[in-house]
Image (cartoon, rainbow, N blue to C red):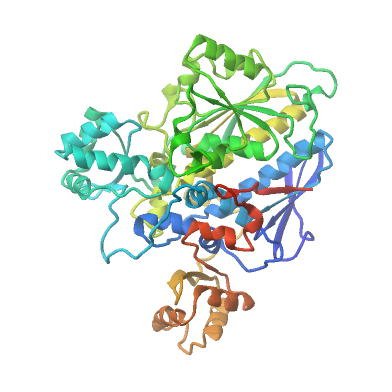
Amino acid sequence: MQTLADENCAGDETLCFEFETPHTAPVTCEITRWEDPSRQAAVSENIMQAACGLMSVHGRTHRQPKPLGLNYVSTLTAALALQGSIAASIGRLRGLPVSSSTVSMAAAGLLSMSQYIAGATASESPETTVTARPLPGSPPACPPFVSLDGVTFELETLDAGPWQKFWSTLSVSSAAAGKGWRAFLLRYARAASPLPDELLLAISKLTYHRISQVCARTGMAICPVRSIDDRAQDDDARQIWQQGPWSFSSFSSGPKPNGDYLRPAGGALPEDDLPLSGFTVIESCRRIQGPLAGHLLALLGATVIRIEPPGGDPLRGMPPMAAGCSARFQALNRLKTVREIDIKSAAGKTEIRELARHADIFLHNWAPGKAVLLNLDHGDLAAINSSLIYAYAGGWATDCAEHVSSNSMPGTDFMAQAYSGVAGKVAGAGSSRGGSLFTVLDVLGGVVAAQGVTIALLNRYMNNVGAKVTSSLMSAATLLCAEDFRDIYSLPASGSKPSTSIINDVYATRQGRIAIECPDVDTVLRLAEVLDLTAGIENNGFQRCLSEVFLSKTADQWVELFQHAGIPSAVVIEDLADLQTLAHLQPGLTPGSYTQVNSPWRFK
């Protein structure tokens, strides 16, 4: 496989590349800025974080928008662009008239916000977020925690029992622990976790070593917020960085009649023009990473059969509701067919095997070792369907229990952020004391998992083999920080390293906030001209002047002026419900009982 840059695709507003293999004709992929192609406003990573609401969601714990401190939307955009081109290649192999795919940076940003947008626009009691400024010097009363000896760390448990035992050992009242448990549990959904002061006070009186001892006795998991340098010293770090965010192992599909390897397992050819139409995915996943992967495959046309326990997934009832179901849950699962199966029972496991026999993809994110215990691992299912793509979307690097990283900690987003160095990088950017309560790795991990499945499907077509593909939150974290690892390992860059912008900040205006970025002196000079500032840009008073002059107009008024001057800027979206009112984002959204985020891809 190879990708080729195309210098003649379009002007500065579009980036293009071609994807081709020895078996496929070139597919052109276009990467644009906005969903509305008529909008040509300059963008950067932070500008798009502001425009799509990510900055606001990340800043919820501080009650004010903050940049994430990572090239997050950019990484998502690149991953989605590559996946779109691979999917288009599969479509061409199957005879579909598709020759190009398009994805926008704005579409990637909206995808990352899909659950939060659903919650903010639900028809029943939509979530609202107050972003008033916190009191000066007051740290947020939320995770991560800080010990007496200054160690920043994350705690994790998926059950109330260990939580109550832990805080009881620290002499915290059951009432405070109970109130904290609800906030702690909902942090995945709301990107906020306001904990009672009593909990943080108790933690602050103990050393990290002492807290670790209490965790060991009560069943709580603990992980310090590590740096990228720390992570780079782990035995598996360099290998994961070098191989990319997936590991593949193939098994022969056996001989098939000529051309049959291009057909889905059910034998049907596509009935519409989406690249994965006719393919069947069996998904047994919970939370965000796995369900998002299944959702992306559905957006590419696949039929996704979602396995839920008898009575349905409990998260269906999590408020806010829309048309009788959790809006956040629908955001990731609305396109799927549901089968309720007790996978622990003999009858349930038989039903799973029968579904897998006629499927193209089996996707799960079960706890490490569970697939082996259920006799539903890749070997078991490959024995009945040798062309199956068996996909595991884990927290760490494998689904084998004996290989789980760091003493079998739960492989959840916030633990992976802490262990991988992502949380440390976010903290180093000054946007938090450690990590984000926005599910950074769950979302990217879901994109990476779906991307790996698509690659394995293409390989099946070209080489007539089934495969197991493994991805994880840790491998997604490595992808997100790939440049940092390259620098640590002292390897040459593939291109020039971007310089630090001269101005890259958020400012209050007469109404709303504005994000602005000036990557070079020329842009700063244009800014000074628009603002009619006489102070030299090297003058220490220049930033103070900016803060004062921005108060003279609204954020919308400033953005209009800056767009004409070619200065990257955006109104900081603080209420996610406002996104559906913006013309340059409306093509990516569908209003209803909650606002749906549309497919990030367009094929033609």
Give the side of residue 409 with respect to residue 5, left or right.
Answer: left
Of residues 288 and 585, the one nearer the viewer is 585
Q: Taking 557 as reference, is 403 above or below it?
A: above
Indicate the position of residue 580 as horizontal and vertical percent values: 58, 58
Identify the residue at horizontal 72%, vertical 44% (top origin).
85
Residue 234 lies in quadrant: top left
Q: Position of residue 29 (x, y in %)?
A: 73, 50
Position of 81 relative to 159 (above/below): below
Q: Please state the horizontal and vertical placement of residue 65, each as a whole percent of the image.
A: 42, 62
Which corner quadrant of the image does residue 212 belong to? top left
Q: Is residue 143 above or below residue 96?
A: below
Which residue ends up furthest to the bottom in the rendered image?
534
Q: Reply above or below: 235 against 376.
A: below
Give left or right: position of 34 versus 316: right
Q: Give me the residue at 81% from left, 33% from top.
A: 94
Asked if residue 22 can be seen in this view, the reply is no
Q: Quadrant of the N terminus?
A: top right
Residue in the picture at 64% in, 46% down: 80
Q: Nearer the viewer, residue 401 or 555?
A: 555
Q: What residue sits 29% from the left and 32% below the top? A: 160
Outermost residue, top side:
346
**Residue reaching furthest to the left:** 171
- Note whether residue 150 is visible: yes
Depth check: 385 or 167 in front?
A: 167
Q: How many marks?
A: 0
Residue 311 position within the rendered picture, expressed as x and y whole percent measured from the top left: 47, 24
